[in-house]
Amino acid sequence: MRVPMSWLKAMIDLPEGTATSDVAALITEHTAAVERVEVVGGEVSGPVVVGRVVSAEPQPQKNGKTIMWCRVDVGAGLNAEGHPKNADGAEAGRGIVCGAHNFGVGDLVVVALPGAELPGGFAISARKTYGHMSDGMICASDELGTGVDHTGIIVLPESLEGRPLEPGQDAREILGIPEDVLEIDVTPDIGYCMSIRGIAREVAQVMGLHFSDPYREPPVGPVEGPVEVRIDDPACSQFVALPVTGLDPHATTPAYIADRITRAGMRPINLAVDVTNYVMIESGQPLHAYDQEKVSGTIVVRKAADGEHLVTLDDTDRTLDPDDLLITDDSGPIGLAGVMGGAATEMTGESTSIILEGAHFEGTTVARAYRRHRLGSEASRRFERGVDPICAHSAVVRAAELLKLHGGATIGAPTIVGEVPAMPQCHISSDLPGRILGIPVTREKVIEILSASRVDVTALGDTLSLVPPTWRPDLVDPYDYVEEIGRKLGFDQIEPAEPPVTAGTGLTEAQRGRRAALGAVAGAGFVEVISLPFIGDADLDAMGLPDDDDRRRTVALANPLDDTHGYLRTSLLPGLFQAVTRNLSRSQEDLALFECGTVFLSTGSARAPRPSVEHRPSDEDLDAISAALPDQPRMLAGVLTGNWRPQRWDGPGRHVEWTHAVMLATEAAAAVGLRLERRPEHRAPWHPGRCAGLLVDGRLIGYAGELHPQVCRAAGLPARSCAVELDLDALLAAAPHTGEISQLSTFPVAKEDVALVVDESVPAQAVHQALVAGGGPLLESVELFDVYTGSQVGEGRKSLAFNLRLRALDRTLTDADAAGARDAAVAEAARQFGAELRS
């Protein structure tokens, strides 16, 4: 929320000498954080004055542009011929070249004279341009930093607040610059502060100042008027329609209105639109103006029907949802309530008769609608946070009076349909604020603060009966009032205190397992990242997934951040790919990144029901909601590029390879007491023949290896990049429980080495498993330590050398015991794969 200080001062009389920084500090301490103070026009210095155009001669140029060669009176007066003169009476050379055409002879303009400096360090000097010596510059609002309009220069009125303007006056005073503008971060619970009125009321209360409210109390009950209105849905509690006729379509917006809405962050358009925006910013009540000639029949507020469409003011044809609240007439929808009007009844530059709408819409309905259609607006953001329901009538009346004052309009009779909802009553103990805030707050102080906040307080002994004002929908339960008292006392008055620590059960076994696994992966040299959990079709295509791959079981988002990432992720790899490419763009090429997070796989179930919030959902509803939820396994994934070990003085470098991807999985498994098995697999996005399936107790839980070259190109990764992804939940489920401790033998180990010759097609992991199966209970571990291919074993054959560690729990093994276990292991490998002992 942007709050110009001049607008704030129009509602409260700040003491003389009050600095903007003091007001900002006070708002931050008692209401909401002031993020910064912008000084509008603060960069303008030197002579910037009012000038009157004495002559303006259009001169076409060779480049096709027509410039205006002007003579401007900037305070030296005129000679007998009507031209500006110097002090000695001779004609002055105050000629100025201007590229704009929105002014004429006799108009008052803003002139930056030589010696002035404009925003961006733009110094003004006399210089020759288009064949003339231009002795200054006639300014547009964007050139002075007071607005963004560059379609024409600023044309000033003949008088300001009853005082005529004269050439030579300091234009900064007339333009109201420099001016401080507060940028306030209004939290969602204090929607009433999304207005100048709300901020001014807060400042006035804390400083003990008088608050001048420009909005009169409206009629409470329904009022019949010339505009027929009907409310068919409770999401609209009140609707006010006020006809305004005879509006001059060519009337210009007064400078003070244009300046204020510009400094508040909106762009001036025309008088009717500017007035509705002005009143919205000032009061917090959104308004809308319909062209009365385009509205047919009765205005009806209702929910949308299936198949209905609405072309909104942004010329977009929108398919409506049955939950959308609409403004309609006999022709159909003419507006999306609280969000945006329809193009069919849009005001144009020729509109003279309008219907001003002020209504109170239920915030949740508006919030769902603007998110559903991705159509956030200043109006919807205010309705979402809560709008004063009693302000609709007084806001349209104020807007109508401004249109009458500045546009010559005639105000008709209002139509008011619906009732202002009653505010909730609450009872609290007078000592509750002190007990919760931890500081002494007397009963009298509680009543004083709440009464100043316009809460209706009735004291019943030590119990207070409270009814909030209409603009405070956030005051509902006792602790809302405690917060209100704490804010008004000041956050600096509340001493921070840590809550007492209660005894707990500590981390769950799954939490300990995850921490151990992730700690082991980080300790192995990988860096953890966190990516957004959204993907799109392009991400799945880049991974080379076939159409029947389970990772294409996507869950679509109702309101994605952008159209290219419309699903919840089904794999962690796309997010890691993006993290890698982002680092590569910053010349970080040696990467070992990992992420742990949930993926979402659609179950194909029907859409979850939306139960009522008025009572507990039924068991059937809860079952249906649970069935509609996607599968959500927690995964662990990593991507590696570049060098694992850089080339240095003490040795050659080593490029990342599939073994490093496998290492991430084995380190995570070892941290929870498991040993992974591997077998060849073929699965996208890995390279066929360079992909290992990762197994625990015979169950496939993940994959690791080198990425397919086409995937590397599609994802923007370096060639030979490697990746791993495994189901961490499945890994932890297979891990031994914390209480399970393996018995340790105190007897010495016996070591046996065997070299087995097998066909080259036989995986080393398969031979490893055969040795384990044949070795029996005495076999403690098996490790592959050498692989040989060459003439000594024959073509198409290879030698696998394993180290076998044997140990018993109850005795020292004899040579015969060790030899027997070794021979049994070799025999099983021979039976399965025809393995032969290498001589």
Image (cartoon, grey):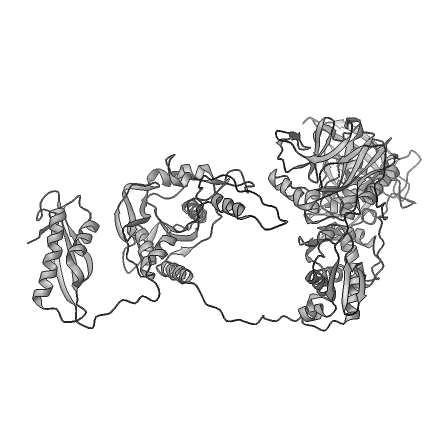
Q: Is residue 289 above or below residue 118?
A: above
User: Which residue appears at 70% of the width and 68% of the height?
Assistant: 432
Q: Quadrant of residue 67?
A: top right
Q: Is residue 448 above or below residue 801?
A: below
Front residue (pair 62, 497): 497
Whether residue 250 sits left or right of residue 650 in the image: it is: right
Whether residue 386 sits left or right of residue 711 in the image: it is: right
Front residue (pair 124, 493): 493
Q: Quadrant of residue 58?
A: top right
Quarter of the C terminus within the rendering: bottom left
Toward the left, the furthest residue is 839
Residue 590 x/y as whole percent: 37, 52
Residue 73 can be seen, yes or no: no
Total number of numbered labels?
0
Toward the front, the furthest residue is 619
Whether residue 784 sits left or right of residue 296 in the image: it is: left
Q: Quadrant of residue 63?
A: top right
Front residue (pair 501, 649): 501
User: Which residue appears at 25% of the width and 69% of the height?
Assistant: 743
Residue 47 x/y as whole percent: 79, 48
Residue 739 x/y as whole percent: 34, 67
Residue 680 x/y as whole percent: 25, 45
Residue 376 can be seen, yes or no: yes
Toward the right, the furthest residue is 80
Front residue (pair 549, 140): 549
